[in-house]
Image: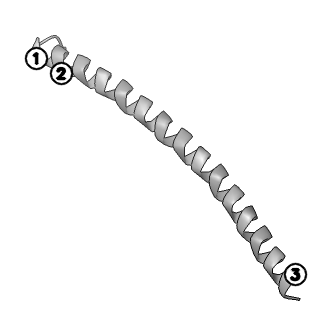
Amino acid sequence: MKKQLREYVWDTIGSSKNKLAGKDDALEAMVTALKEKINELKGELKIFKATVGNGMLL
């Protein structure tokens, strides 16, 4: 009985570990995408600031 319980616990831990690893990968991909978008928006903001600074807006 103890052996079965031990195996069940280890299987459950292993399964949870695999699920967490998958979620970790997904979260890392989301963070990378957000960082890229932030850099893109920062570039656009610089352009807008330069445009306003030069009085080029209509």
Residue 39 in the image: x percent, y percent?
35, 27
What residue did someone put label 1 on? 53
Residue 54 in the image: x percent, y percent?
11, 11
* Amino acid type for the residue under numbered disc 2: Lys
Cα gap from disc 3 to disc 1, whole angstroms: 72 Å
Residue 17 in the image: x percent, y percent?
67, 60
What residue did someone put label 3 on? 4
* Amino acid type for the residue under numbered disc 3: Gln
Cα gap from disc 2 to disc 3, whole angstroms: 66 Å
The image quadrant of residue 41 is top left
Residue 13 in the image: x percent, y percent?
71, 69
Question: Which residue in the rendered view is the most extreme toward the front?
Answer: 3
> Is there CB contact under 8 Å for labels 2 and 1?
yes
From this view, report whether residue 27 is shown above or below residue 2. Answer: above
Tell me the SS state at disc 1.
helix
Count the marks: 3
